Image: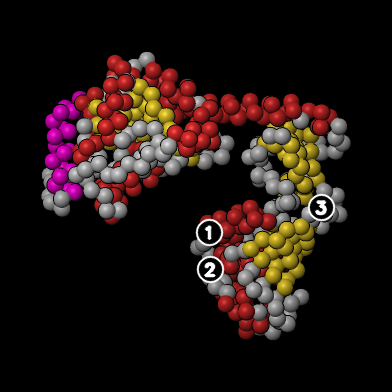
Protein backbone atom coordinates (compact mmCIF):
# COMPACT_ATOMS: atom_id res chain seq x y z
CA UNK A 1 0.00 0.00 0.00
CA UNK A 2 1.45 3.33 -1.04
CA UNK A 3 0.53 6.41 0.98
CA UNK A 4 0.52 9.52 -1.17
CA UNK A 5 -1.13 12.86 -1.81
CA UNK A 6 -3.76 14.13 0.62
CA UNK A 7 -3.21 11.39 3.20
CA UNK A 8 -1.06 12.94 5.94
CA UNK A 9 -2.87 15.31 8.29
CA UNK A 10 0.31 16.95 9.64
CA UNK A 11 3.81 17.78 8.46
CA UNK A 12 6.96 17.02 10.49
CA UNK A 13 7.57 19.82 12.97
CA UNK A 14 3.90 20.87 13.19
CA UNK A 15 2.95 22.58 16.46
CA UNK A 16 0.15 20.14 17.30
CA UNK A 17 -1.48 22.24 20.01
CA UNK A 18 -1.67 25.35 17.86
CA UNK A 19 -2.76 23.45 14.75
CA UNK A 20 -5.50 21.67 16.69
CA UNK A 21 -6.88 25.03 17.87
CA UNK A 22 -6.80 26.35 14.28
CA UNK A 23 -8.64 23.26 13.00
CA UNK A 24 -11.34 23.50 15.68
CA UNK A 25 -11.98 27.14 14.75
CA UNK A 26 -12.07 26.16 11.07
CA UNK A 27 -14.52 23.33 11.85
CA UNK A 28 -16.90 25.60 13.72
CA UNK A 29 -16.79 28.27 11.01
CA UNK A 30 -17.13 25.99 7.96
CA UNK A 31 -19.75 23.65 9.46
CA UNK A 32 -21.69 26.70 10.63
CA UNK A 33 -21.69 28.16 7.12
CA UNK A 34 -19.20 30.94 7.87
CA UNK A 35 -15.78 31.91 6.53
CA UNK A 36 -12.41 30.67 7.72
CA UNK A 37 -8.88 31.58 6.59
CA UNK A 38 -7.98 27.88 6.92
CA UNK A 39 -9.80 25.61 4.53
CA UNK A 40 -10.39 21.87 5.04
CA UNK A 41 -8.35 19.45 2.97
CA UNK A 42 -10.20 18.08 -0.06
CA UNK A 43 -10.84 14.67 1.49
CA UNK A 44 -12.21 16.32 4.65
CA UNK A 45 -14.42 18.74 2.70
CA UNK A 46 -15.93 15.86 0.70
CA UNK A 47 -16.67 13.93 3.86
CA UNK A 48 -18.21 16.90 5.69
CA UNK A 49 -20.50 17.47 2.70
CA UNK A 50 -21.66 13.84 2.79
CA UNK A 51 -22.19 13.88 6.54
CA UNK A 52 -24.11 17.16 6.53
CA UNK A 53 -26.31 15.83 3.73
CA UNK A 54 -27.04 12.78 5.91
CA UNK A 55 -28.33 15.10 8.66
CA UNK A 56 -25.77 14.32 11.38
CA UNK A 57 -25.22 16.79 14.23
CA UNK A 58 -21.62 17.85 14.98
CA UNK A 59 -22.38 19.10 18.48
CA UNK A 60 -23.01 15.76 20.17
CA UNK A 61 -22.15 12.11 19.76
CA UNK A 62 -24.54 10.70 17.19
CA UNK A 63 -26.31 7.45 18.05
CA UNK A 64 -23.94 4.46 18.35
CA UNK A 65 -25.55 1.12 17.60
CA UNK A 66 -23.46 -1.60 19.28
CA UNK A 67 -23.96 -5.23 18.25
CA UNK A 68 -24.40 -7.91 20.88
CA UNK A 69 -21.54 -10.26 21.65
CA UNK A 70 -23.02 -13.19 19.69
CA UNK A 71 -23.16 -11.12 16.51
CA UNK A 72 -19.63 -9.79 17.10
CA UNK A 73 -18.32 -13.34 17.49
CA UNK A 74 -20.14 -14.46 14.35
CA UNK A 75 -18.60 -11.65 12.34
CA UNK A 76 -15.17 -12.47 13.73
CA UNK A 77 -15.54 -16.12 12.72
CA UNK A 78 -16.67 -15.14 9.22
CA UNK A 79 -13.88 -12.61 8.68
CA UNK A 80 -10.69 -13.62 6.84
CA UNK A 81 -8.97 -11.04 9.03
CA UNK A 82 -9.31 -13.44 11.96
CA UNK A 83 -6.37 -15.29 10.37
CA UNK A 84 -4.07 -12.28 10.72
CA UNK A 85 -5.40 -10.21 13.61
CA UNK A 86 -2.77 -11.72 15.91
CA UNK A 87 0.03 -10.52 13.63
CA UNK A 88 -1.66 -7.12 13.29
CA UNK A 89 -1.77 -6.52 17.02
CA UNK A 90 1.93 -7.38 17.30
CA UNK A 91 2.67 -4.29 15.20
CA UNK A 92 1.66 -2.05 18.11
CA UNK A 93 2.04 -4.36 21.10
CA UNK A 94 5.50 -3.07 22.02
CA UNK A 95 4.71 0.64 21.75
CA UNK A 96 0.99 0.92 22.56
CA UNK A 97 1.28 2.01 26.19
CA UNK A 98 4.29 4.30 25.74
CA UNK A 99 2.80 5.92 22.62
CA UNK A 100 -0.77 6.07 23.98
CA UNK A 101 -2.36 4.44 20.97
CA UNK A 102 -4.67 1.62 20.09
CA UNK A 103 -5.18 -0.42 16.95
CA UNK A 104 -8.71 -1.10 15.71
CA UNK A 105 -9.69 -3.64 13.05
CA UNK A 106 -13.14 -3.48 11.42
CA UNK A 107 -14.94 -5.61 8.87
CA UNK A 108 -15.94 -4.35 5.42
CA UNK A 109 -19.14 -2.88 6.93
CA UNK A 110 -17.14 -0.64 9.26
CA UNK A 111 -18.10 -2.61 12.39
CA UNK A 112 -15.33 -2.68 15.00
CA UNK A 113 -14.36 -6.31 15.59
CA UNK A 114 -11.05 -6.06 17.45
CA UNK A 115 -9.18 -3.48 19.55
CA UNK A 116 -5.69 -3.74 20.99
CA UNK A 117 -3.44 -1.24 22.72
CA UNK A 118 -3.19 1.15 25.62
CA UNK A 119 -5.75 0.42 28.36
CA UNK A 120 -5.96 4.16 29.08
CA UNK A 121 -6.76 4.99 25.44
CA UNK A 122 -9.28 2.16 25.19
CA UNK A 123 -11.03 3.53 28.26
CA UNK A 124 -11.28 6.98 26.66
CA UNK A 125 -12.53 5.35 23.44
CA UNK A 126 -15.31 3.62 25.39
CA UNK A 127 -16.71 7.05 26.34
CA UNK A 128 -17.13 7.77 22.59
CA UNK A 129 -18.76 4.42 21.90
CA UNK A 130 -15.61 3.49 19.96
CA UNK A 131 -15.71 -0.15 21.01
CA UNK A 132 -16.18 -3.67 19.69
CA UNK A 133 -19.49 -4.03 17.86
CA UNK A 134 -19.83 -0.31 17.06
CA UNK A 135 -20.69 0.84 13.53
CA UNK A 136 -17.96 3.37 12.72
CA UNK A 137 -19.10 4.46 9.27
CA UNK A 138 -19.54 8.09 8.20
CA UNK A 139 -23.31 7.64 8.14
CA UNK A 140 -23.28 6.77 11.84
CA UNK A 141 -20.48 8.75 13.50
CA UNK A 142 -19.57 11.38 10.93
CA UNK A 143 -16.16 12.08 9.40
CA UNK A 144 -13.60 9.68 10.87
CA UNK A 145 -10.64 7.80 9.38
CA UNK A 146 -12.36 4.39 9.34
CA UNK A 147 -15.64 5.48 7.78
CA UNK A 148 -14.00 7.91 5.38
CA UNK A 149 -11.44 5.28 4.28
CA UNK A 150 -14.36 2.97 3.50
CA UNK A 151 -16.16 5.65 1.49
CA UNK A 152 -13.08 6.94 -0.33
CA UNK A 153 -11.56 3.44 -0.78
CA UNK A 154 -8.22 4.94 0.24
CA UNK A 155 -6.03 5.52 3.31
CA UNK A 156 -7.15 8.44 5.48
CA UNK A 157 -5.56 10.33 8.38
CA UNK A 158 -7.55 12.87 10.40
CA UNK A 159 -6.40 15.18 13.16
CA UNK A 160 -8.45 16.93 15.82
CA UNK A 161 -11.00 19.36 14.29
CA UNK A 162 -11.02 17.49 10.97
CA UNK A 163 -13.42 15.03 12.63
CA UNK A 164 -17.06 16.01 12.16
CA UNK A 165 -18.19 15.38 15.74
CA UNK A 166 -16.82 17.76 18.33
CA UNK A 167 -16.46 14.88 20.78
CA UNK A 168 -13.82 13.38 18.48
CA UNK A 169 -11.69 16.53 18.28
CA UNK A 170 -9.31 15.38 21.05
CA UNK A 171 -8.31 12.44 18.78
CA UNK A 172 -6.25 11.58 15.75
CA UNK A 173 -7.00 8.50 13.65
CA UNK A 174 -5.12 6.86 10.78
CA UNK A 175 -6.84 4.14 8.74
CA UNK A 176 -6.31 2.11 5.58
CA UNK A 177 -8.27 -0.64 3.78
CA UNK A 178 -7.11 -4.27 3.80
CA UNK A 179 -7.93 -6.35 0.71
CA UNK A 180 -7.97 -10.07 0.04
CA UNK A 181 -4.84 -10.58 -2.12
CA UNK A 182 -6.58 -13.41 -3.98
CA UNK A 183 -9.70 -11.60 -5.13
CA UNK A 184 -9.12 -7.92 -4.39
CA UNK A 185 -12.21 -7.99 -2.14
CA UNK A 186 -12.30 -5.42 0.66
CA UNK A 187 -11.97 -7.27 3.97
CA UNK A 188 -11.97 -4.37 6.38
CA UNK A 189 -10.04 -1.44 7.80
CA UNK A 190 -7.04 -1.24 10.10
CA UNK A 191 -6.85 1.95 12.17
CA UNK A 192 -4.48 3.42 14.72
CA UNK A 193 -5.98 6.09 16.99
CA UNK A 194 -4.92 8.03 20.03
CA UNK A 195 -4.93 11.43 21.74
CA UNK A 196 -4.45 14.18 19.16
CA UNK A 197 -1.41 15.66 20.91
CA UNK A 198 0.48 12.34 20.56
CA UNK A 199 0.23 12.10 16.75
CA UNK A 200 3.63 11.46 15.16
CA UNK A 201 4.42 11.45 11.40
CA UNK A 202 5.58 7.82 11.67
CA UNK A 203 2.04 6.62 12.47
CA UNK A 204 1.23 6.64 8.74
CA UNK A 205 4.16 4.31 8.07
CA UNK A 206 3.05 2.06 10.94
CA UNK A 207 -0.42 1.63 9.42
CA UNK A 208 1.06 0.99 5.96
CA UNK A 209 3.35 -1.67 7.44
CA UNK A 210 0.43 -3.35 9.18
CA UNK A 211 -1.60 -3.53 5.95
CA UNK A 212 1.31 -4.89 3.90
CA UNK A 213 2.06 -7.49 6.55
CA UNK A 214 -1.58 -8.57 6.83
CA UNK A 215 -2.02 -8.97 3.07
CA UNK A 216 1.28 -10.88 2.77
CA UNK A 217 0.20 -13.19 5.59
CA UNK A 218 -3.20 -13.75 3.95
CA UNK A 219 -1.38 -14.79 0.77
CA UNK A 220 0.76 -17.26 2.74
CA UNK A 221 -2.42 -18.74 4.24
CA UNK A 222 -3.76 -19.02 0.69
CA UNK A 223 -0.68 -20.93 -0.46
CA UNK A 224 -0.97 -23.24 2.55
CA UNK A 225 -4.61 -23.97 1.68
CA UNK A 226 -3.62 -24.84 -1.90
CA UNK A 227 -1.01 -27.25 -0.56
CA UNK A 228 -3.60 -28.91 1.73
CA UNK A 229 -5.98 -29.17 -1.24
CA UNK A 230 -3.28 -30.92 -3.30
CA UNK A 231 -2.64 -33.35 -0.46
CA UNK A 232 -6.34 -34.09 0.12
CA UNK A 233 -7.07 -34.57 -3.58
CA UNK A 234 -3.91 -36.59 -4.24
CA UNK A 235 -5.61 -40.02 -4.44
CA UNK A 236 -8.34 -38.68 -6.76
CA UNK A 237 -5.79 -37.07 -9.08
CA UNK A 238 -3.64 -40.21 -9.15
CA UNK A 239 -6.57 -42.25 -10.44
CA UNK A 240 -7.35 -39.88 -13.32
CA UNK A 241 -6.48 -40.30 -16.96
CA UNK A 242 -6.49 -37.28 -19.24
CA UNK A 243 -6.06 -33.58 -18.52
CA UNK A 244 -7.53 -31.92 -15.40
CA UNK A 245 -7.23 -28.91 -13.14
CA UNK A 246 -7.49 -28.83 -9.37
CA UNK A 247 -8.64 -25.40 -8.14
CA UNK A 248 -9.77 -23.89 -4.86
CA UNK A 249 -13.18 -22.33 -4.21
CA UNK A 250 -11.97 -19.02 -5.70
CA UNK A 251 -10.65 -20.59 -8.92
CA UNK A 252 -6.95 -20.50 -7.97
CA UNK A 253 -5.12 -23.43 -9.52
CA UNK A 254 -3.55 -25.84 -7.04
CA UNK A 255 -2.43 -28.39 -9.64
CA UNK A 256 -2.58 -28.84 -13.42
CA UNK A 257 -2.34 -32.23 -15.11
CA UNK A 258 -1.94 -32.58 -18.87
CA UNK A 259 -2.34 -28.84 -19.46
CA UNK A 260 -0.03 -25.85 -19.24
CA UNK A 261 -0.39 -24.39 -15.77
CA UNK A 262 -2.38 -21.20 -15.30
CA UNK A 263 -2.78 -19.21 -12.09
CA UNK A 264 -6.55 -18.83 -11.97
CA UNK A 265 -9.79 -19.62 -13.78
CA UNK A 266 -13.34 -18.37 -13.42
CA UNK A 267 -14.95 -19.43 -10.15
CA UNK A 268 -16.52 -22.86 -10.83
CA UNK A 269 -20.21 -23.53 -10.26
CA UNK A 270 -21.63 -27.05 -10.41
CA UNK A 271 -24.46 -26.21 -12.85
CA UNK A 272 -22.34 -24.02 -15.15
CA UNK A 273 -20.08 -25.27 -17.94
CA UNK A 274 -16.63 -23.69 -18.09
CA UNK A 275 -14.57 -22.92 -21.18
CA UNK A 276 -10.93 -23.37 -20.15
CA UNK A 277 -8.15 -22.42 -22.59
CA UNK A 278 -6.33 -25.62 -23.46
CA UNK A 279 -9.14 -27.85 -22.18
CA UNK A 280 -12.24 -26.53 -23.95
CA UNK A 281 -15.69 -27.02 -22.44
CA UNK A 282 -15.34 -28.49 -18.95
CA UNK A 283 -17.43 -29.73 -16.04
CA UNK A 284 -16.69 -28.92 -12.39
CA UNK A 285 -16.85 -31.59 -9.67
CA UNK A 286 -16.82 -30.28 -6.12
CA UNK A 287 -14.20 -31.66 -3.72
CA UNK A 288 -13.48 -30.75 -0.07
CA UNK A 289 -11.92 -27.31 -0.31
CA UNK A 290 -12.07 -26.96 -4.08
CA UNK A 291 -13.03 -28.28 -7.50
CA UNK A 292 -11.85 -30.84 -10.00
CA UNK A 293 -12.15 -29.52 -13.57
CA UNK A 294 -12.21 -31.99 -16.47
CA UNK A 295 -13.08 -31.55 -20.16
CA UNK A 296 -16.32 -32.73 -21.70
CA UNK A 297 -16.24 -34.91 -24.76
CA UNK A 298 -15.25 -32.89 -27.87
CA UNK A 299 -18.72 -33.55 -29.27
CA UNK A 300 -20.56 -32.26 -26.18
CA UNK A 301 -22.99 -29.45 -26.95
CA UNK A 302 -24.26 -26.81 -24.55
CA UNK A 303 -27.79 -25.81 -25.63
CA UNK A 304 -29.18 -22.40 -24.73
CA UNK A 305 -32.70 -21.13 -25.29
CA UNK A 306 -33.22 -17.37 -25.05
CA UNK A 307 -36.88 -16.76 -24.24
CA UNK A 308 -38.00 -13.25 -25.22
CA UNK A 309 -41.74 -13.92 -25.17
CA UNK A 310 -41.98 -12.23 -21.76
CA UNK A 311 -39.39 -11.11 -19.23
CA UNK A 312 -36.09 -12.36 -20.69
CA UNK A 313 -34.88 -15.74 -19.44
CA UNK A 314 -32.17 -18.14 -20.50
CA UNK A 315 -32.39 -21.94 -20.27
CA UNK A 316 -29.12 -23.89 -20.47
CA UNK A 317 -28.89 -27.64 -21.00
CA UNK A 318 -25.56 -29.41 -20.62
CA UNK A 319 -24.57 -33.07 -20.75
CA UNK A 320 -25.44 -33.68 -17.09
CA UNK A 321 -27.69 -30.84 -15.92
CA UNK A 322 -29.98 -28.03 -16.95
CA UNK A 323 -31.05 -24.75 -15.40
CA UNK A 324 -32.94 -21.56 -16.11
CA UNK A 325 -32.19 -17.99 -15.06
CA UNK A 326 -33.73 -14.54 -15.48
CA UNK A 327 -31.73 -12.08 -17.58
CA UNK A 328 -31.44 -8.33 -17.54
CA UNK A 329 -32.69 -6.55 -20.64
CA UNK A 330 -29.14 -5.51 -21.52
CA UNK A 331 -27.81 -9.07 -21.28
CA UNK A 332 -30.68 -10.38 -23.41
CA UNK A 333 -29.92 -7.71 -26.03
CA UNK A 334 -26.26 -8.73 -26.14
CA UNK A 335 -27.08 -12.43 -26.52
CA UNK A 336 -29.54 -11.70 -29.32
CA UNK A 337 -27.06 -9.50 -31.16
CA UNK A 338 -24.33 -12.14 -30.93
CA UNK A 339 -26.75 -14.82 -32.10
CA UNK A 340 -27.69 -12.75 -35.15
CA UNK A 341 -24.01 -12.26 -36.04
CA UNK A 342 -23.32 -15.98 -36.01
CA UNK A 343 -19.76 -17.29 -36.13
CA UNK A 344 -18.39 -13.93 -37.33
CA UNK A 345 -19.07 -12.44 -33.91
CA UNK A 346 -18.66 -8.78 -32.97
CA UNK A 347 -15.70 -6.70 -31.87
CA UNK A 348 -15.92 -4.53 -28.76
CA UNK A 349 -16.42 -1.47 -30.96
CA UNK A 350 -19.12 -3.16 -33.06
CA UNK A 351 -20.98 -4.29 -29.95
CA UNK A 352 -20.70 -0.80 -28.45
CA UNK A 353 -22.23 0.67 -31.61
CA UNK A 354 -24.97 -1.96 -31.68
CA UNK A 355 -25.93 -1.65 -28.00
CA UNK A 356 -25.30 2.05 -27.28
CA UNK A 357 -25.27 3.66 -30.71
CA UNK A 358 -21.65 4.84 -30.53
CA UNK A 359 -18.14 3.34 -30.19
CA UNK A 360 -17.40 5.08 -26.88
CA UNK A 361 -18.80 2.47 -24.50
CA UNK A 362 -16.09 -0.19 -24.81
CA UNK A 363 -15.53 -0.31 -21.04
CA UNK A 364 -19.26 -0.78 -20.40
CA UNK A 365 -19.44 -3.53 -23.03
CA UNK A 366 -16.55 -5.45 -21.45
CA UNK A 367 -18.13 -5.13 -18.02
CA UNK A 368 -21.53 -6.35 -19.25
CA UNK A 369 -20.01 -9.36 -21.03
CA UNK A 370 -18.00 -10.19 -17.91
CA UNK A 371 -21.18 -10.14 -15.82
CA UNK A 372 -22.96 -12.19 -18.46
CA UNK A 373 -20.26 -14.86 -18.26
CA UNK A 374 -20.83 -15.08 -14.52
CA UNK A 375 -24.48 -15.89 -15.26
CA UNK A 376 -23.95 -18.34 -18.13
CA UNK A 377 -20.53 -19.80 -17.59
CA UNK A 378 -17.87 -19.58 -20.28
CA UNK A 379 -19.99 -20.02 -23.41
CA UNK A 380 -18.79 -16.75 -25.00
CA UNK A 381 -15.48 -16.29 -26.77
CA UNK A 382 -13.63 -12.99 -27.00
CA UNK A 383 -11.89 -11.17 -29.84
CA UNK A 384 -14.43 -11.18 -31.36
CA UNK A 385 -17.31 -11.81 -28.98
CA UNK A 386 -19.25 -14.85 -30.19
CA UNK A 387 -20.65 -18.13 -28.93
CA UNK A 388 -18.12 -20.94 -28.52
CA UNK A 389 -18.22 -23.77 -31.03
CA UNK A 390 -19.78 -26.02 -28.38
CA UNK A 391 -22.68 -23.65 -27.64
CA UNK A 392 -25.94 -23.50 -29.62
CA UNK A 393 -28.53 -20.79 -29.02
CA UNK A 394 -32.16 -20.90 -30.09
CA UNK A 395 -34.83 -18.22 -29.68
CA UNK A 396 -38.33 -18.22 -28.22
CA UNK A 397 -39.91 -14.98 -29.44
CA UNK A 398 -43.63 -15.17 -28.82
CA UNK A 399 -44.06 -13.96 -32.43
CA UNK A 400 -43.66 -15.35 -35.95
CA UNK A 401 -41.02 -12.82 -36.91
CA UNK A 402 -38.16 -11.24 -35.00
CA UNK A 403 -39.37 -7.82 -36.17
CA UNK A 404 -42.73 -8.44 -34.45
CA UNK A 405 -41.27 -9.54 -31.10
CA UNK A 406 -42.31 -7.15 -28.30
CA UNK A 407 -38.85 -7.37 -26.73
CA UNK A 408 -37.21 -6.24 -29.97
CA UNK A 409 -39.72 -3.43 -30.47
CA UNK A 410 -39.01 -2.10 -26.95
CA UNK A 411 -35.23 -2.57 -27.12
CA UNK A 412 -32.94 0.32 -26.29
CA UNK A 413 -30.28 -1.10 -28.63
CA UNK A 414 -30.27 0.90 -31.91
CA UNK A 415 -29.26 -2.20 -33.86
CA UNK A 416 -32.22 -4.18 -32.53
CA UNK A 417 -34.71 -1.34 -32.99
CA UNK A 418 -33.64 -1.17 -36.63
CA UNK A 419 -34.82 -4.75 -37.08
CA UNK A 420 -38.44 -3.68 -36.68
CA UNK A 421 -38.16 -2.03 -40.10
CA UNK A 422 -36.77 -5.17 -41.74
CA UNK A 423 -38.61 -8.26 -42.86
CA UNK A 424 -36.73 -10.58 -40.51
CA UNK A 425 -37.71 -14.17 -39.70
CA UNK A 426 -36.62 -16.21 -36.66
CA UNK A 427 -33.96 -18.37 -38.25
Q: At 31% across and 35% down in the image, what residue appears? A: 129
Residue closer to the observer: 4 or 210: 210
- How packed mark 1 is, by other alpha carbons closer than 10 Å (few <14, some 14-19, many 20 or more), is few
Q: Disc 3 marks which residue?
A: 320
- Is 69 displayed left or right of 226 in the figure? left
Q: At 37% across and 39% down in the image, what residue appears? A: 66
Quadrant (top left, top right, bottom left, bottom right) of the C terminus: bottom right
Q: Is residue 94 above or below residue 4?
A: above
Q: Disc 2 marks which residue?
A: 356
Q: Which element type, helix, strand or loop, lies under badge 2?
A: helix
Quadrant (top left, top right, bottom left, bottom right) of the N terminus: top left
Q: Which residues are magenta?
A: 10-31
N-terminal of the pair, mark 3 or mark 1, is 3
Locate residue 269, reporting x and y percent.
69, 47
Q: Can residue 91 be seen here? A: yes
Q: Quadrant of residue 37?
A: top left
Q: Can residue 40 be seen here? A: no
Locate residue 50, reporting x and y percent.
30, 51
Q: Nearer the viewer, mark 2 or mark 3?
A: 3
Please say whether residue 21 is one of the residues in the magenta stretch. yes
Q: Nearer the viewer, mark 3 or mark 1?
A: 3
- Is 329 displayed left or right of 295 in the figure? left
Q: Disc 1 marks which residue?
A: 364
Q: Is residue 158 above or below residue 102?
A: below
- CA–CA distance in space, label 2 to label 3: 37 Å
Tell me the tag on residue 201: none
Please say whether residue 192 is one of the residues in the magenta stretch. no
Kindly check if marks 1 and 2 are in contact, taking CB atoms under 8 A apart as contact.
yes
Q: At 64% across and 55% down in the image, what residue appears? A: 375
Q: Quadrant of residue 131?
A: top left
N-terminal of the pair, mark 2 or mark 3, is 3
Kindly check if marks 3 and 1 are in contact, taking CB atoms under 8 A apart as contact.
no
Amino acid sequence: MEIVGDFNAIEPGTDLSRYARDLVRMHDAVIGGGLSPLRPRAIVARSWSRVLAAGLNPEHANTRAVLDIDEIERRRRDSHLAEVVGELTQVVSGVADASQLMMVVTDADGVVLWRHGSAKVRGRADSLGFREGADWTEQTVGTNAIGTALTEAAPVQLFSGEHFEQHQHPWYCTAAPIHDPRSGELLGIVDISGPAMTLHPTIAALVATAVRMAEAQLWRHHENRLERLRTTAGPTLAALTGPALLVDEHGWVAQASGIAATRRIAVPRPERTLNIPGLGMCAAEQLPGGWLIRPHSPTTLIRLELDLSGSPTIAVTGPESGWRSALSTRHAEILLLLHLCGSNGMSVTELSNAVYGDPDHAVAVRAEVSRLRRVLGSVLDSRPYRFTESARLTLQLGADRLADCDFVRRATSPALRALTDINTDTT
